[in-house]
Image: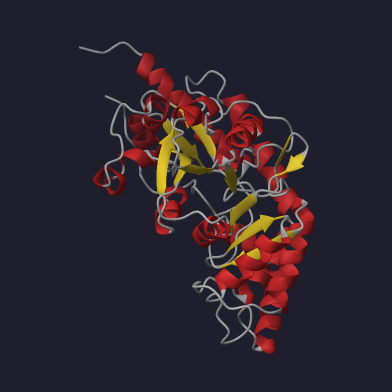
Amino acid sequence: MIPTKSSEIQVPFLDLKSQYASIKEEILEAVYAVLESAHYVSGERVEGFEDEFARYIGARYVVGVSSGTSALELALQAANIGLGDEVIVPANSFFASAEAVSRVGARPVFADVNPATFHLDASSVQNHLTPRTRAILPVHLYGRAADLREIEELAAMRNLQIIEDACQAHGVRCNGIQVGGSGHLTCFSFYPGKNLGAYGDAGGIACNDPKQAQMLRILRDHGSPKKYHHVVVGTNARMAELQAAVLSVKLRHLDDWNNQRARHADVYVHKLRSSGVLTPASAKKGEHNFHLFIIRAAQRDDLKIFLRERGIETGIHYPVPLHLTSAYQALGHPGRGSLPIVEHLANEILSLPMYPDLKTDYIEKVASAICEFAALQRMPATA
Protein backbone atom coordinates (compact mmCIF):
# COMPACT_ATOMS: atom_id res chain seq x y z
CA MET A 1 0.00 0.00 0.00
CA ILE A 2 1.40 3.40 -1.03
CA PRO A 3 1.29 5.87 1.90
CA THR A 4 -0.96 8.90 1.42
CA LYS A 5 -0.45 12.48 2.50
CA SER A 6 -2.44 15.71 2.62
CA SER A 7 -4.33 16.54 -0.58
CA GLU A 8 -4.11 20.32 -0.09
CA ILE A 9 -2.75 21.84 -3.31
CA GLN A 10 0.74 23.24 -2.86
CA VAL A 11 1.90 23.12 -6.49
CA PRO A 12 -0.86 24.45 -8.78
CA PHE A 13 -1.14 23.22 -12.34
CA LEU A 14 -1.38 26.82 -13.58
CA ASP A 15 -0.88 30.17 -11.84
CA LEU A 16 -2.22 33.16 -13.78
CA LYS A 17 -2.10 35.46 -10.75
CA SER A 18 1.69 35.48 -10.70
CA GLN A 19 1.80 36.42 -14.38
CA TYR A 20 -0.66 39.28 -13.83
CA ALA A 21 1.37 40.56 -10.89
CA SER A 22 4.47 40.77 -13.07
CA ILE A 23 2.79 43.01 -15.69
CA LYS A 24 0.07 44.62 -13.58
CA GLU A 25 0.90 48.26 -14.34
CA GLU A 26 1.07 47.65 -18.11
CA ILE A 27 -2.23 45.79 -18.04
CA LEU A 28 -4.05 48.41 -15.98
CA GLU A 29 -2.84 51.18 -18.26
CA ALA A 30 -4.10 49.32 -21.33
CA VAL A 31 -7.45 48.45 -19.72
CA TYR A 32 -8.05 52.00 -18.48
CA ALA A 33 -7.37 53.30 -21.99
CA VAL A 34 -10.13 51.05 -23.36
CA LEU A 35 -12.55 52.14 -20.65
CA GLU A 36 -11.79 55.81 -21.29
CA SER A 37 -12.37 55.33 -25.01
CA ALA A 38 -15.79 53.72 -24.41
CA HIS A 39 -15.16 51.69 -27.59
CA TYR A 40 -15.39 48.01 -26.80
CA VAL A 41 -15.71 45.90 -29.97
CA SER A 42 -13.64 45.72 -33.20
CA GLY A 43 -11.86 49.05 -33.02
CA GLU A 44 -8.35 50.41 -33.30
CA ARG A 45 -6.96 48.15 -30.58
CA VAL A 46 -8.14 45.03 -32.38
CA GLU A 47 -6.61 46.33 -35.61
CA GLY A 48 -3.41 47.19 -33.74
CA PHE A 49 -3.08 43.72 -32.24
CA GLU A 50 -3.86 42.08 -35.59
CA ASP A 51 -0.98 44.01 -37.19
CA GLU A 52 1.40 43.31 -34.30
CA PHE A 53 0.71 39.60 -34.23
CA ALA A 54 0.90 39.32 -38.03
CA ARG A 55 4.36 40.90 -37.98
CA TYR A 56 5.41 38.66 -35.10
CA ILE A 57 4.49 35.40 -36.86
CA GLY A 58 5.42 36.52 -40.37
CA ALA A 59 1.93 36.47 -41.86
CA ARG A 60 0.42 39.07 -44.19
CA TYR A 61 -2.86 39.13 -42.28
CA VAL A 62 -4.31 38.23 -38.90
CA VAL A 63 -8.05 38.49 -38.29
CA GLY A 64 -9.05 38.72 -34.64
CA VAL A 65 -12.11 36.75 -33.57
CA SER A 66 -13.97 35.82 -30.40
CA SER A 67 -12.32 32.45 -29.62
CA GLY A 68 -10.10 29.70 -30.93
CA THR A 69 -13.19 27.67 -31.77
CA SER A 70 -14.58 30.56 -33.81
CA ALA A 71 -11.23 30.80 -35.57
CA LEU A 72 -11.46 27.17 -36.66
CA GLU A 73 -15.06 27.47 -37.81
CA LEU A 74 -14.50 30.66 -39.79
CA ALA A 75 -11.30 29.32 -41.36
CA LEU A 76 -13.18 26.26 -42.59
CA GLN A 77 -15.94 28.49 -43.97
CA ALA A 78 -13.41 30.76 -45.68
CA ALA A 79 -11.92 27.62 -47.28
CA ASN A 80 -15.41 26.69 -48.57
CA ILE A 81 -15.55 23.51 -46.51
CA GLY A 82 -19.12 22.43 -45.90
CA LEU A 83 -21.88 19.88 -46.27
CA GLY A 84 -20.69 16.54 -47.68
CA ASP A 85 -16.99 17.33 -47.28
CA GLU A 86 -14.55 15.38 -45.12
CA VAL A 87 -11.68 16.82 -43.11
CA ILE A 88 -8.87 14.69 -41.63
CA VAL A 89 -8.35 15.50 -37.94
CA PRO A 90 -5.99 13.93 -35.36
CA ALA A 91 -7.91 12.06 -32.67
CA ASN A 92 -5.62 13.33 -29.91
CA SER A 93 -6.71 16.95 -29.60
CA PHE A 94 -9.22 19.17 -27.84
CA PHE A 95 -12.82 18.60 -28.93
CA ALA A 96 -12.99 21.94 -30.78
CA SER A 97 -10.65 20.67 -33.51
CA ALA A 98 -13.38 18.26 -34.65
CA GLU A 99 -16.36 20.24 -33.40
CA ALA A 100 -15.59 23.10 -35.79
CA VAL A 101 -15.63 20.69 -38.73
CA SER A 102 -19.03 19.39 -37.68
CA ARG A 103 -20.36 22.91 -37.12
CA VAL A 104 -19.77 23.86 -40.76
CA GLY A 105 -21.62 20.74 -41.91
CA ALA A 106 -18.59 18.66 -42.84
CA ARG A 107 -17.50 15.31 -41.37
CA PRO A 108 -14.32 14.97 -39.30
CA VAL A 109 -12.41 11.82 -40.16
CA PHE A 110 -10.06 10.83 -37.35
CA ALA A 111 -6.47 9.75 -37.95
CA ASP A 112 -3.72 8.42 -35.70
CA VAL A 113 -0.66 10.30 -34.45
CA ASN A 114 3.09 9.94 -34.10
CA PRO A 115 3.81 8.41 -30.64
CA ALA A 116 6.86 10.65 -30.07
CA THR A 117 5.55 14.06 -31.16
CA PHE A 118 1.78 13.38 -30.80
CA HIS A 119 1.30 15.06 -34.18
CA LEU A 120 -0.87 13.88 -37.06
CA ASP A 121 0.73 10.87 -38.77
CA ALA A 122 0.94 11.28 -42.56
CA SER A 123 0.60 7.56 -43.25
CA SER A 124 -2.57 7.40 -41.17
CA VAL A 125 -3.89 10.45 -43.05
CA GLN A 126 -3.26 8.67 -46.34
CA ASN A 127 -5.16 5.62 -45.10
CA HIS A 128 -8.21 7.75 -44.30
CA LEU A 129 -8.46 9.69 -47.57
CA THR A 130 -11.63 9.29 -49.62
CA PRO A 131 -13.04 11.06 -52.69
CA ARG A 132 -14.87 13.37 -50.26
CA THR A 133 -11.74 14.54 -48.46
CA ARG A 134 -11.32 18.28 -48.94
CA ALA A 135 -8.90 19.33 -46.21
CA ILE A 136 -6.42 18.22 -43.55
CA LEU A 137 -6.41 19.87 -40.14
CA PRO A 138 -3.07 19.20 -38.38
CA VAL A 139 -2.71 20.33 -34.76
CA HIS A 140 0.49 21.83 -33.33
CA LEU A 141 -0.22 19.98 -30.10
CA TYR A 142 1.03 20.90 -26.62
CA GLY A 143 3.04 23.81 -28.05
CA ARG A 144 5.34 21.79 -30.30
CA ALA A 145 5.53 23.00 -33.90
CA ALA A 146 4.51 20.21 -36.26
CA ASP A 147 6.70 19.35 -39.23
CA LEU A 148 4.11 19.58 -42.02
CA ARG A 149 6.29 18.66 -45.00
CA GLU A 150 4.81 15.17 -45.51
CA ILE A 151 1.29 16.50 -44.95
CA GLU A 152 1.92 19.29 -47.47
CA GLU A 153 3.22 16.81 -50.08
CA LEU A 154 0.16 14.64 -49.59
CA ALA A 155 -2.16 17.65 -49.80
CA ALA A 156 -0.51 18.86 -52.99
CA MET A 157 -0.89 15.44 -54.66
CA ARG A 158 -4.58 15.27 -53.78
CA ASN A 159 -5.39 18.98 -54.20
CA LEU A 160 -6.40 19.29 -50.54
CA GLN A 161 -6.39 22.35 -48.33
CA ILE A 162 -4.46 22.54 -45.06
CA ILE A 163 -5.95 24.41 -42.12
CA GLU A 164 -3.61 24.54 -39.14
CA ASP A 165 -4.80 24.36 -35.55
CA ALA A 166 -2.17 26.40 -33.73
CA CYS A 167 -4.27 27.10 -30.65
CA GLN A 168 -1.39 25.98 -28.40
CA ALA A 169 1.56 27.03 -30.57
CA HIS A 170 2.19 30.74 -30.06
CA GLY A 171 5.74 31.78 -30.85
CA VAL A 172 7.25 28.55 -32.17
CA ARG A 173 8.75 27.64 -35.52
CA CYS A 174 9.67 24.58 -37.57
CA ASN A 175 12.01 24.37 -40.57
CA GLY A 176 12.63 28.09 -40.24
CA ILE A 177 8.95 29.04 -40.54
CA GLN A 178 7.04 30.57 -37.65
CA VAL A 179 3.75 28.82 -36.94
CA GLY A 180 1.20 31.08 -38.60
CA GLY A 181 3.55 32.21 -41.32
CA SER A 182 3.10 29.23 -43.65
CA GLY A 183 0.44 30.84 -45.82
CA HIS A 184 -2.15 28.25 -44.77
CA LEU A 185 -5.16 29.38 -42.83
CA THR A 186 -3.80 29.05 -39.29
CA CYS A 187 -5.98 29.29 -36.19
CA PHE A 188 -4.95 30.56 -32.76
CA SER A 189 -6.71 30.57 -29.40
CA PHE A 190 -6.02 33.31 -26.88
CA TYR A 191 -7.89 31.60 -24.05
CA PRO A 192 -6.52 32.82 -20.68
CA GLY A 193 -4.44 29.70 -20.02
CA LYS A 194 -2.60 29.83 -23.35
CA ASN A 195 0.99 31.03 -23.66
CA LEU A 196 -0.47 34.21 -25.16
CA GLY A 197 -3.75 34.47 -23.29
CA ALA A 198 -6.41 37.15 -23.05
CA TYR A 199 -8.55 37.88 -19.98
CA GLY A 200 -11.48 36.05 -21.50
CA ASP A 201 -12.14 34.27 -24.78
CA ALA A 202 -10.41 35.46 -27.95
CA GLY A 203 -8.86 33.97 -31.07
CA GLY A 204 -7.26 34.80 -34.39
CA ILE A 205 -6.72 33.48 -37.90
CA ALA A 206 -3.54 34.05 -39.90
CA CYS A 207 -3.32 33.88 -43.68
CA ASN A 208 -1.52 35.40 -46.65
CA ASP A 209 -4.44 35.57 -49.09
CA PRO A 210 -6.17 38.99 -49.17
CA LYS A 211 -9.44 37.47 -50.37
CA GLN A 212 -9.49 35.00 -47.50
CA ALA A 213 -8.67 37.77 -45.01
CA GLN A 214 -11.51 39.90 -46.33
CA MET A 215 -13.95 36.99 -46.18
CA LEU A 216 -12.91 36.23 -42.60
CA ARG A 217 -13.60 39.84 -41.59
CA ILE A 218 -17.01 39.65 -43.23
CA LEU A 219 -17.88 36.29 -41.69
CA ARG A 220 -16.95 37.38 -38.14
CA ASP A 221 -19.36 40.35 -38.37
CA HIS A 222 -22.68 38.85 -39.46
CA GLY A 223 -21.56 38.54 -43.07
CA SER A 224 -21.37 42.30 -43.32
CA PRO A 225 -18.56 44.34 -44.92
CA LYS A 226 -20.33 47.46 -43.67
CA LYS A 227 -23.22 48.07 -41.30
CA TYR A 228 -26.58 46.67 -42.46
CA HIS A 229 -25.07 45.41 -45.72
CA HIS A 230 -25.00 41.60 -45.46
CA VAL A 231 -23.46 39.75 -48.37
CA VAL A 232 -23.25 36.25 -46.82
CA VAL A 233 -24.62 34.53 -43.73
CA GLY A 234 -21.98 35.02 -41.07
CA THR A 235 -21.98 35.11 -37.29
CA ASN A 236 -21.01 37.29 -34.36
CA ALA A 237 -17.39 36.36 -33.70
CA ARG A 238 -15.76 39.76 -33.22
CA MET A 239 -12.82 40.30 -30.89
CA ALA A 240 -13.34 42.66 -27.96
CA GLU A 241 -11.17 45.76 -27.68
CA LEU A 242 -10.35 44.90 -24.07
CA GLN A 243 -8.95 41.52 -25.06
CA ALA A 244 -6.91 43.03 -27.89
CA ALA A 245 -5.43 45.58 -25.50
CA VAL A 246 -4.42 42.84 -23.05
CA LEU A 247 -2.94 40.73 -25.84
CA SER A 248 -0.86 43.61 -27.16
CA VAL A 249 0.72 43.99 -23.74
CA LYS A 250 1.32 40.27 -23.34
CA LEU A 251 2.76 39.85 -26.84
CA ARG A 252 5.73 41.95 -25.75
CA HIS A 253 6.55 39.30 -23.12
CA LEU A 254 5.74 36.14 -25.07
CA ASP A 255 9.28 35.22 -26.12
CA ASP A 256 10.60 35.62 -22.58
CA TRP A 257 7.74 33.54 -21.19
CA ASN A 258 8.31 30.80 -23.76
CA ASN A 259 12.01 30.76 -22.93
CA GLN A 260 11.19 30.39 -19.23
CA ARG A 261 8.91 27.44 -20.03
CA ALA A 262 11.68 25.82 -22.08
CA ARG A 263 14.12 26.19 -19.16
CA HIS A 264 11.57 24.62 -16.81
CA ALA A 265 11.18 21.75 -19.28
CA ASP A 266 14.94 21.18 -19.28
CA VAL A 267 14.91 20.92 -15.48
CA TYR A 268 11.99 18.48 -15.56
CA VAL A 269 13.74 16.28 -18.13
CA HIS A 270 16.97 16.26 -16.14
CA LYS A 271 15.32 15.39 -12.85
CA LEU A 272 13.03 12.75 -14.32
CA ARG A 273 15.77 10.78 -16.09
CA SER A 274 15.55 7.85 -13.67
CA SER A 275 11.88 8.16 -12.79
CA GLY A 276 10.47 5.48 -15.07
CA VAL A 277 8.30 7.95 -17.01
CA LEU A 278 8.80 9.12 -20.59
CA THR A 279 9.42 12.85 -21.01
CA PRO A 280 8.75 14.81 -24.24
CA ALA A 281 10.88 14.00 -27.27
CA SER A 282 13.68 16.49 -27.80
CA ALA A 283 13.03 19.48 -30.03
CA LYS A 284 15.30 22.15 -31.48
CA LYS A 285 15.38 25.51 -29.74
CA GLY A 286 12.29 27.52 -30.60
CA GLU A 287 10.28 24.53 -31.84
CA HIS A 288 8.43 23.89 -28.56
CA ASN A 289 6.84 26.48 -26.26
CA PHE A 290 5.81 23.87 -23.67
CA HIS A 291 2.27 25.08 -23.40
CA LEU A 292 1.92 21.71 -21.70
CA PHE A 293 4.62 19.44 -20.33
CA ILE A 294 3.41 15.92 -21.08
CA ILE A 295 4.89 12.76 -19.62
CA ARG A 296 3.89 9.15 -20.28
CA ALA A 297 3.45 6.77 -17.36
CA ALA A 298 2.30 3.16 -17.47
CA GLN A 299 0.40 3.61 -14.19
CA ARG A 300 -0.83 7.10 -15.01
CA ASP A 301 -4.03 7.09 -12.95
CA ASP A 302 -2.28 5.84 -9.82
CA LEU A 303 0.50 8.40 -10.33
CA LYS A 304 -2.01 11.23 -10.72
CA ILE A 305 -3.67 10.27 -7.41
CA PHE A 306 -0.27 9.92 -5.73
CA LEU A 307 0.74 13.42 -6.82
CA ARG A 308 -2.59 14.90 -5.80
CA GLU A 309 -2.20 13.43 -2.32
CA ARG A 310 1.12 15.27 -2.10
CA GLY A 311 -0.40 18.61 -3.06
CA ILE A 312 0.58 18.50 -6.74
CA GLU A 313 -2.08 19.34 -9.30
CA THR A 314 -1.87 17.69 -12.73
CA GLY A 315 -4.04 17.37 -15.83
CA ILE A 316 -4.76 14.92 -18.64
CA HIS A 317 -4.77 16.30 -22.19
CA TYR A 318 -6.75 14.40 -23.38
CA PRO A 319 -8.36 11.47 -21.51
CA VAL A 320 -10.81 10.44 -24.24
CA PRO A 321 -9.69 10.29 -27.91
CA LEU A 322 -12.03 12.25 -30.15
CA HIS A 323 -13.23 9.21 -32.06
CA LEU A 324 -14.33 7.61 -28.77
CA THR A 325 -16.25 10.60 -27.39
CA SER A 326 -19.98 10.06 -26.97
CA ALA A 327 -20.74 12.73 -29.57
CA TYR A 328 -18.84 11.02 -32.36
CA GLN A 329 -19.73 7.48 -31.35
CA ALA A 330 -23.36 8.53 -31.74
CA LEU A 331 -22.54 9.75 -35.25
CA GLY A 332 -21.22 6.36 -36.29
CA HIS A 333 -17.47 6.94 -36.20
CA PRO A 334 -15.16 3.90 -35.84
CA GLY A 335 -14.84 2.77 -32.22
CA ARG A 336 -12.22 1.36 -29.91
CA GLY A 337 -9.26 -0.31 -31.60
CA SER A 338 -9.43 1.77 -34.77
CA LEU A 339 -6.62 4.19 -33.79
CA PRO A 340 -4.25 2.20 -31.57
CA ILE A 341 -1.55 4.82 -30.91
CA VAL A 342 -3.99 7.52 -29.83
CA GLU A 343 -5.87 5.06 -27.66
CA HIS A 344 -2.67 3.83 -26.02
CA LEU A 345 -1.47 7.38 -25.35
CA ALA A 346 -4.79 8.34 -23.76
CA ASN A 347 -4.08 5.84 -20.97
CA GLU A 348 -0.54 7.09 -20.31
CA ILE A 349 -0.32 10.87 -20.82
CA LEU A 350 -0.16 13.18 -17.83
CA SER A 351 0.35 16.95 -17.84
CA LEU A 352 2.64 18.34 -15.14
CA PRO A 353 2.53 21.92 -13.78
CA MET A 354 3.98 24.33 -16.34
CA TYR A 355 3.89 28.13 -16.54
CA PRO A 356 6.53 30.87 -16.82
CA ASP A 357 6.64 31.68 -13.10
CA LEU A 358 6.84 28.04 -12.01
CA LYS A 359 9.33 27.89 -9.15
CA THR A 360 12.33 25.59 -9.36
CA ASP A 361 11.52 24.11 -5.96
CA TYR A 362 8.05 23.27 -7.31
CA ILE A 363 9.65 21.36 -10.17
CA GLU A 364 11.91 19.58 -7.71
CA LYS A 365 8.90 18.67 -5.56
CA VAL A 366 7.04 17.26 -8.56
CA ALA A 367 10.04 15.31 -9.83
CA SER A 368 10.87 13.99 -6.37
CA ALA A 369 7.31 12.74 -5.90
CA ILE A 370 7.35 10.98 -9.29
CA CYS A 371 10.65 9.30 -8.44
CA GLU A 372 9.22 8.29 -5.04
CA PHE A 373 6.23 6.74 -6.79
CA ALA A 374 8.52 4.81 -9.13
CA ALA A 375 10.60 3.52 -6.20
CA LEU A 376 7.48 2.33 -4.37
CA GLN A 377 6.30 0.48 -7.46
CA ARG A 378 9.60 -1.42 -7.57
CA MET A 379 9.41 -2.45 -3.91
CA PRO A 380 8.50 -6.11 -3.31
CA ALA A 381 5.04 -6.68 -1.88
CA THR A 382 4.95 -7.24 1.89
CA ALA A 383 3.10 -10.08 3.57
The N terminus, quarter of image:
top left
Residue at the image position 46 percent from the left and 31 percent from the top? 369
**Of the pair 223 and 266, the residue shown nearer to us:** 223
Image coordinates of residue 86 in percent, x first then y, are 44, 44
Residue in the foreground of this view, choosing between 7 and 139 = 139
Left or right relative to 123: residue 48 = right
User: What residue lies at 42% left-to-right and 25% top-to-bottom?
Assistant: 341
Determine whether 46 is above or below 70 in the image: below
- Residue 64 image position (x, y, % from top left): 63, 66
For residue 286, which quarter of the picture? top right
Instruction: Tell me: residue 189, above or below residue 312.
Output: below
Q: Is residue 252 visible?
A: no
- Of residues 107 and 363, which is closer to you in this image? 107
Q: Is residue 180 left or right of residue 314?
A: right
Q: How many marks?
A: 0
- To which quarter of the image does residue 132 belong? top left
Residue 51: image quadrant is bottom right
Say above or below: 368 vs 16: above
Classify 137 as above or below 366.
below
The answer to whether residue 166 is left or right of residue 309 is right
Where residue 71 appears, as percent x and y from the top left, is 55, 59
* Residue 52 at least partly seen: yes
**Extreme residue in the front direction:** 131
- Position in image of residue 137 (x %, y %): 53, 43
What quarter of the picture does the C terminus occupy? top left
The chosen color scheme is: secondary structure
